[in-house]
Each structure stands twice: as C-alpha cells, then as structure tokens.
Image (spheres, helix red, strand yellow):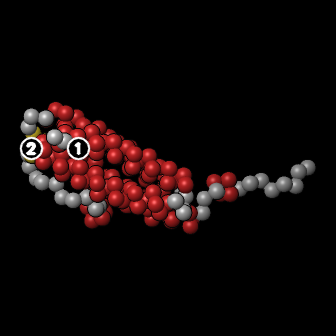
Amino acid sequence: MSTETPVSAQAAGATTPELAAGVAQFLAPVVIDLEALVVNGKQAHWNVRGADFIAIHELLDQLVDHAQEFADDSAERVVALGLPVDSRLETVAAKATLPALSDGFQDWKVTVTQVVAQIDAALVTVRAAVEGLDEVDLNSQDIVIGIERGLVKDRWLLQSHLAA
Ligand SMILES: [Fe+2]
C-alpha cells in the first residue's frame, strides 16, 4: 500500500493569493481600459462619416472585437487565479484612462485621430502590465504581450489612413 500523500488540488493548481493579487494589480487596469475601448470603439463605429466611411467603419468593428477578446483573456486570467474582476459600468467609467471622444457624427479624420488616441492610452496601461508582470507571473505577461502586439496592429490599420 502506498504511503504517498496525494497532491492536493490547490497544490496542483500552483497558485497563491499573493500571485493572484500581483497579477490582478496589473491586469485589472487592462480589463478596464479595454472595456472602455469596446464602448468607445462602437460609438466611433456608429458615428463616423465621410469619404473613408466604410473602411473606418469596418476597421472599428474589428478593433472592438479584438478589444473584447483581449479583455476576456485578461479578466479570465485573474478569475482563474482566484480573484474576482470588477468591470461594472461605473467602475470602468471611473477608472478608464482613455481620453474623451467627441459627441455626435464625426468626419472620419477626427474619428481616426481620436480612436488612435484611445488606443494609445490603452497601450500605456498594457505596457505597464508587460513591465510589471515580468517579476510577477510570466504566463500573465504573455497575455499582455499579445495584447500589445494586437493593439499596435489595429492602431496601424487606422492611423495609416492619415498618412500623406
Ligand atoms: Fe455595426
């Protein structure tokens, strides 16, 4: 008869409250900024007008889809490690770092300029997470590294419309 103690489920999960808190510290702001980008991206998608309407309209939906997917990856990493996520409307409104969007219909050049500024603000938060998670959890860092790459690509696809 074996005398070995079975590995407990918790030990097998290899996660601790300290790890979860350390990861949440960096991923929670990422979730908030990405959820804000989802809402503002749709606002821009609906209200863009002008000669480049259809290209920008469609690219903005792509951005929204990616931002939602990235938020989901970040939020579920935190939850998987054992902590809840606060992505309530009021929390996102209070804590998001994105600049304000202009209200109403917008010429596509204004839309692109403002949405690029939204992405840039989110990228500051994402890059802070990449840096901070380097010492905390490389698996969580891997998530935000991928998000950085994706947002930079979406930024390029939009911003290139403004190039001379
Ligand atoms: Fe749509």
* Residue marked by disc 1: 159
Mark 1 Cβ inside 8 Å of ligand 1 = no
Dot 1, crowdedness within 10 Å: few (<14), some or many (≥20)? some
In the rendered image, residue 144, in percent from the top left (x then y), is placed at 44, 52
Please name whichever residue, 86 or 114, is drawn nearer the observer in this view of the structure. Answer: 114
Q: Is residue 71 above or below residue 161?
A: below
* Residue found at the very far right of the displayed protein: 1
Q: Residue at x 19, y 39 (%)?
A: 161
Secondary-structure class at tag 2: strand
Left or right, 28 with reference to 117: right
Secondary-structure class at tag 1: helix
Dot 2, crowdedness within 10 Å: few (<14), some or many (≥20)? some
Residue type at numbered disc 1: Gln
* Residue found at the very far front of the displayed protein: 164
Left or right, 83 with reference to 48: right
Please name whichever residue, 89 or 120, is drawn nearer the observer in this view of the structure. Answer: 120
Q: Given this view, does label 1 or label 2 mark the residue nearer the observer?
A: 1
Q: Residue at x 44, y 46 (%)?
A: 146
In the rendered image, residue 121, in percent from the top left (x then y), is placed at 29, 57
Q: CA distance from mark 1 to mark 2?
A: 14 Å
Q: Is residue 148 above or below residue 61?
A: below
Q: Is residue 84 visible?
A: no
Left or right, 1 with reference to 77: right
Q: Is residue 128 visible?
A: yes
In the rendered image, residue 159, in percent from the top left (x then y), is placed at 23, 44
Upstream in the sequence, badge 1 or badge 2? 2
Write down the quadrant of residue 96 in the picture. bottom left
* Residue marked by disc 2: 107
Task: Name the quadrant of the C terminus.
Answer: top left
Residue contact between numbered discs 1 and 2, judged by CB atoms under 8 Å: no
* Residue found at the very far top of the displayed protein: 54
